Image (tube, rainbow, N blue to C red):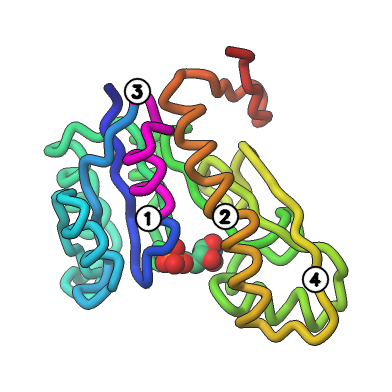
Amino acid sequence: MLNIAVLVSGGGTNLQALIDAQQQEKIPGGKLALVLSSKPDAYALKRAEQAGIPTLVLSRKSFHEQKAYDEALVEALEQAKIDLVVLAGFMTIIGDSVIDRFRNRILNVHPSLIPSFCGEGFYGLRVHEAALARGVKVTGATVHFVNEICDGGPIVLQKPVAVQEGDTPEILQHRVMEEAEWEILPKAVALFCQGRLEVINGIVHCREE
Ligand code: GAR
């Protein structure tokens, strides 16, 4: 059984999708073992508590420098014997040492079809504002492994979502979550826990069952 940590900063709807998937036994081989928040008041913490998952708050502000934050993060993950880290709306930078320690074992969900609308400055609602400003007719979500390049790691799963006339960033954000993120994040986690994902030369290959 692989131990999964979910890193959050906000509402935690993606965390909820993982909790629901676990309760429906859709993540065989994996167990939500820790929810770590960068914010003490994140609603995601309540969701974790309700589901009986241990929680921890690690606020970047409590640390003078990135290195100390990264060390505390790795220590917390190691103490909980974490095998897979899932960034689900985690809005704090994690340093290269953490990425290296968990190489191809950190998944992130991003609310666009990478390589569109991604990289530095593209997070949360801003991604959908940019998509609407550009007038794209299709957007979506991506789950990828995290490497040293912001939103540049190997792509695991993507799902397109149609943009509709009259969409606001908020409406589009919700549709992308509902139609794409909440589906592909638990799916990617399940594939990982079943040992079906392999990264070769920066490309993710998914083995048949
Ligand atoms: C999600 O839409 C997620 O894709 C996005 O933040 C939201 C978190 O919502 N992440 C990023 O933009 C990362 N670049 P949630 O807390 O309800 O899961």
**Other-residue count near label 2 (Cα within 10 Å), few / some / many at <14 / 14–19 / ≥20:** many
Whether the residue carrying mark 2 lies under 8 Å from ligand 1 is answered with yes
Residue 27 counted in the magenta span: yes
Which residue is denoted by mark 3 in the rendering?
Answer: 29
Q: Earlier in the sequence, mark 2 or mark 4?
A: 4
Badge 4 amino acid: Val
Query: How far apart are the two marked residues, 3 and 1, measured between alpha carbons?
Result: 18 Å
Instruction: Indicate left or right for 62 with 11 as reference.
Output: left
Q: Quadrant of residue 25?
A: top left
Query: How far apart are the two marked residues, 2 and 1, measured between alpha carbons?
Result: 11 Å
Query: How far apart are the two marked residues, 3 and 2, measured between alpha carbons?
Result: 21 Å
Determine the residue positioned at 15% across, 58% down.
Answer: 56
Q: Earlier in the sequence, mark 3 or mark 1?
A: 1
Badge 2 amino acid: Glu
Q: Which mark is residue 181?
A: 2
Q: Earlier in the sequence, mark 3 or mark 2?
A: 3
Determine the residue positioned at 86% across, 70% down.
Answer: 136
Query: Which span of residues is magenta-colored?
Result: 17-29
Query: How far apart are the two marked residues, 2 and 4, measured between alpha carbons?
Result: 15 Å
- Vertical side of 119 occupied by 97: above or below: above
Query: How far apart are the two marked residues, 4 and 3, measured between alpha carbons?
Result: 36 Å
Query: How far apart are the two marked residues, 1 and 4, measured between alpha carbons?
Result: 25 Å
